[in-house]
Amino acid sequence: MEIIICPDEAQVGVYAAAKIAKIAAGVGPKVVLGVATGSSPLTTYIELAKLEKAGKLDLSGASAFALDEYVGLPYTHPESYHDVIRRTVTEPLGIDPAKVSVPDGANPETAGEAYEAAIKQAGGVDVQILGIGANGHVGFNEPGSSLASRTRIKTLTAKTREDNARFFDSLDQVPTHCITQGLGTILDARHVVLVANGAGKADAIAAIAEGPVSSMWPGSVLQLHQYATLVIDEAAAAKLTHQDYYRQIFSTLPAWQRLDV
Ligand code: GLP
């Protein structure tokens, strides 16, 4: 696992975008992106849009797959992930909306299999952008999720519903279920770039990067991925035991591995 510690949230966006742009350049304009909702990747999307504008990133033929969707929320609801992805990713990055897929929360029984088939049909995800929940969830793979899981319906934990209540008028309005790519689905992406900011994520980051691989901290499954990068701010890095080593690695990278920032 590669760990990049940045001074603040803005720099997390700069470095994560640079990493994603480097991967995308290796793939070409038909890159398949895996995209995440939540506040953590927002600075990354802003920086990706800047790189496009500067001619340093070509997403003209890109397609995208979202990680998850609430069950039972109309797609026109501003907090449905269909709408969040349109607002924060598809429009700012100018990706053709016809090439952007979000799991079908209106048909949860068949959505999982259909989504897996669509990802396969697209040739798989080249680079998956991830945030992380305070309890270590990625996508909506809550603690206890099978490390081999595929896209399916999940029950949200009370903690996740409370965390996400800030986006709704009241806790009652937060859906109880979702459709999420599984941990096995996420592991199939060719690269993974996880971003995290703030002290509220410090326990989760320490657990997934330095703790045992365990379904109790679902993000720890990334220890099994060959190309997983964590781009985190100082506050999110605060509980990592080997921070000095990660900083040393990053500051002594050979030229070909450095990021263009
Ligand atoms: C939601 C999403 C996750 C996201 C998490 C963290 O639960 N399903 O994909 O990583 O929230 O959100 P935030 O980045 O706002 O802390």
Image (spheres, helix red, strand yellow):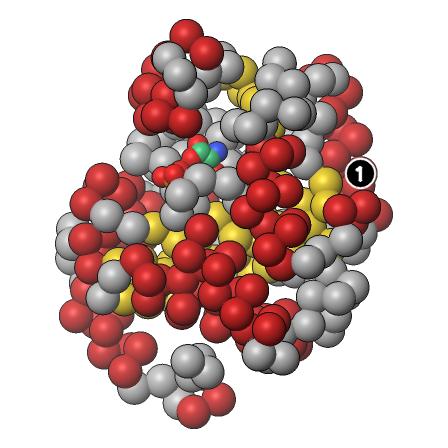
Q: Quadrant of the C terminus?
A: bottom left
Total marks shown come to: 1
Q: Position of residue 107 (x, y in %)?
A: 74, 17
Q: Quadrant of ligand 1?
A: top left
Q: Position of residue 74 (x, y in %)?
A: 65, 19
Q: Residues within 10 Å of mark 1 (few under 14, many from 20)?
A: few
Q: Residue furthest right?
A: 121
Q: Quadrant of residue 201?
A: top left
Q: Quadrant of the N terminus?
A: bottom left
Left or right relative to 251: residue 103: right
Q: Residue at x 74, y 70 (%)?
A: 29
Q: Residue at x 48, y 72 (%)?
A: 18
Q: Residue furthest top?
A: 172
Q: Position of residue 247 (x, y in %)?
A: 23, 73
The residue tagged with tag 1: helix, strand or loop? helix
Q: Residue at x 39, y 54 (%)?
A: 195
Going by the numbered disc 1, the residue's amino acid type is: Ala
Left or right relative to 163: residue 257: right
| Residue 256 shows up from this direction | yes
Residue under label 1:
117
Q: Residue at x 19, y 53 (%)?
A: 235
Q: Position of residue 160 (x, y in %)?
A: 37, 24
Q: On screen, 100 above or below 214?
A: below
Q: On screen, 114 above or below 11?
A: above
